[in-house]
Image (cartoon, grey):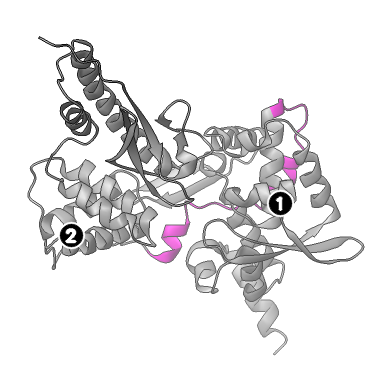
Amino acid sequence: MNQIQLKHSVRLNLRAGGRFSILYGVINLEGKQYKINTGIKLFPYQWNVKKQTAIISNLQSKLDNHNSAEANKEIEAIRKRLQLVEDKARQFLYKSNSELLEALKVAIQPSREISLKEQLLEIASKSSNRKSQTYAINAFFEFVGSGSQINKEAITEFGKYLISKGKAYSTAGNYQILISFLLSKVGISTEGYTKIKDGRSITERKQKQVTLTKEEIQSLEALTDLPYRERITRDIFLLQCSTGQRISDMDKIILGNYEVLKEEKDIKVISFHNQKTKERVYIPINKKDQALALKLKKQRDILEILNSSTFNYKLRKLCKLAGITSPVTYKDKEGNLITLPKCDLVHSHSARHSFITNCFNAGVSKEDITLITGHTSTDMLDKHYLHECTTTISTRLLTTFSTT
């Protein structure tokens, strides 16, 4: 038998460009090149060319890391199939270029039926709402598993499942809408499902979202002799309380990635587009906070601490140390009354709630607050952010009507 040595190599390459792109298997065989679609899609920043793997990093979103993990599973499966082809090639079991090429193609993209989940993900990948739709799809198939009947009852139960997993009612309801819409695109009707609703009043929904008073913020600021990471965590939170921004936008303020619109002796107005909604924000920042931002910029590992999974844990410990422990009673999603010390309910977004509430109590108009926070209307402030106690409301009403 004649043994034929066929020269070949296989490498994975991401299509050039800055968009969500196909990962190709590039086969070089006897001087010719063939590009085979793996069915895997990634953004360029998710692909490590040298290691030939999808990147998983704290600097990426949870969605990107989830997609990278799924891609790596498929890449590993491709590698195992290619190894089988290589083993046969070393035994001279392929008699021609075309025979080896066909085996390599099958290894890179084996013929198989596209699952319902893959169909929905493909539709989502072309949507401007890709991120939310992908989250919803992954959550839905975690819920239904394989072989379950998909109908309006499944969508109804999906909403209850999301609540049991800690999702907000608004998120659960939106996921139901997205999945129903996507299923309709592949001919599956779920019309008539029951959308999950929160039976609590607006006031009850806001009870768990605590705010810090000016005095509590000062007590946090007064803490001394803190370990390095705890001190940086505290200072980031203090800067949030002064500027009203989400944790995802604090790097812009700290690193100076903004436009200065106007500057006077003790204050300047800065502006940038926020990360979540891309709305432009206009932030008045005083000398004290400018100095704090500059101080944070000089600290080591500042971006790592900003993105740390332990940020909220450290923040709660700091609040406890500062004596922010007054009891807070709230109604949970099942209608049970829960009482916890305030420190246990604080998280990075509490700074935004605190800023909005403290500004409003100080007489800043809702319209001006929305310019700073980037909200497009004052409705969001009323529904989610303003936390007025009965004493504050009574005082404000007395002040207003005593002058009329």
Taking the view exactly as shown, the residue that stands out farthest to the front is: 2
Q: Nearer the viewer, residue 303 or 243?
A: 303
Horizontal side, residue 249 vs residue 235: left or right: left
Look at mark 2 in the image and give the residue it sits on.
183
Left or right of 93 in this view: 346: right
The amino acid type, in three-letter code, at marker 2 is: Leu
Circle 2: element type = helix
Q: Amino acid at mark 1?
A: Ile
Which residue occupies 60% across, 37% down? Answer: 315
Residue hosting label 1: 253
Nearer-the-camera pick, 97 or 67: 97
Residue 30 in the figure: left or right of residue 205: left
Residue segment shown in magenta: 201-228
- x then y, percent, for residue 343: 57, 40
Instruction: Give the residue displayed 71% in from the left and 53% down from the top.
Output: 257
Q: Earlier in the sequence, mark 1 or mark 2?
A: 2
Name the residue nearer the viewer: 351 or 404. 351
Residue 206 is a magenta residue: yes
Q: Is residue 335 visible?
A: no
